[in-house]
Amino acid sequence: MRIARYTTGEDPTYGLVDGAGDKIAEISGDPLYSKIELTGRTTTVDEVRLLAPVIPRSKVIGIGKNYAEHAREMGGEAPTEPLMFLVPNTAVAGPDDPVVMPPQSQRVDYEGELAVVIGRMCKDVTPQEARQVVFGYTVANDVTARDLQKSDGQWSRAKGFDTFCPLGPWIETDLDVSDLRLQTRVDGEVRQDGTTADMIHDVWTLISHASQAFTLLPGDAILTGTPEGIGPVEPGQRVEVEIDQIGVLGNPFLRR
Ligand code: MG
């Protein structure tokens, strides 16, 4: 299933999106917490404003340097254990929402990533058990103030500004994520073209590792790292991250 969160000008609602990404069948309630039931109302993607498909109630967990070529382009070796950081949920933005580039940073980068959405509260799960706690997958842009990441020495501010964590366009619940093509484009020009098969630590290992430290709650998101080809965005440019079998997450970047 593809589950979108959207608005037609009123309170956000959820719906099932068809395979072509055109039509939406509205469902009642929040699918993270209640059984999926259609209301009978339908609309189209063009007629609504898509919102971030989930607003994590407790946390977004980022994973640094989970692709060897990206670790290399950052000038280092990949860490032996998954390197985790936390992003506040106030950084989450939706499809087409502007990413606001803060005045404190002179270099804001895109990082196209696969995001895992957790469906069940869990702690200390093994990689084998991890499959059972996944609600679904979506596309993320782990936007980073690269200059502040270096000067701060830790990553909270550089990755945590408001709007720095676009998610969407929807959550795909049935997906084999072992080898999905991931492409990032800036104004249509391809900058990242990788595959999730090149992750150093796979999705199951990442969930297990995170759960050894934190209790994972429904709606928590794990950003699984970015492939090589990161780079800066100029104000006025549009960044699109596309993952096969999920969809395209596009956001304009602008200066406040
Ligand atoms: Mg990242």
Image (spheres, grey):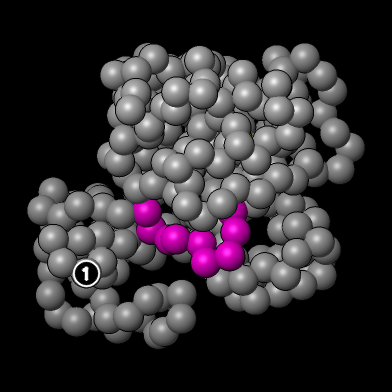
Residue 194 % position (x, y): 57, 27
User: What segment carries the magenta color?
Assistant: 52-60
Residue 82 % position (x, y): 80, 44
Horizontal side, residue 185 vs residue 41: left or right: right
* The furthest residue to the front: 104
Residue 210 % position (x, y): 75, 57
- Res. 39 visible in picture: yes
Residue 196 in which image quadrant: top right
- The C terminus lies in which quarter of the figure? top left
Identified at 86% across, 43% down, the residue is 81
Residue 113 % position (x, y): 54, 38
Residue 219, magenta (yes or no): no
Q: Main secondary structure of the magenta part?
A: loop
Residue 75, placed above or below residue 81: above
Identified at 67% across, 68% down, the residue is 216
Horizontal side, residue 124 vs residue 145: left or right: right
Identified at 81% across, 61% down, the residue is 213
Horizontal side, residue 20 vs residue 91: left or right: left
- Res. 193 visible in picture: no
Closer to the camera in the image, 106 or 233 = 106
Q: Regarding mark 1 in the picture, which secondary structure is present there?
A: loop
Identified at 46% across, 81% down, the residue is 33
Residue 55, magenta (yes or no): yes
Tell me which amino acid carries mark 1.
Answer: Asp
Which residue matches tag 1? 11
**Image mark count:** 1
Horizontal side, residue 202 vs residue 196: left or right: right
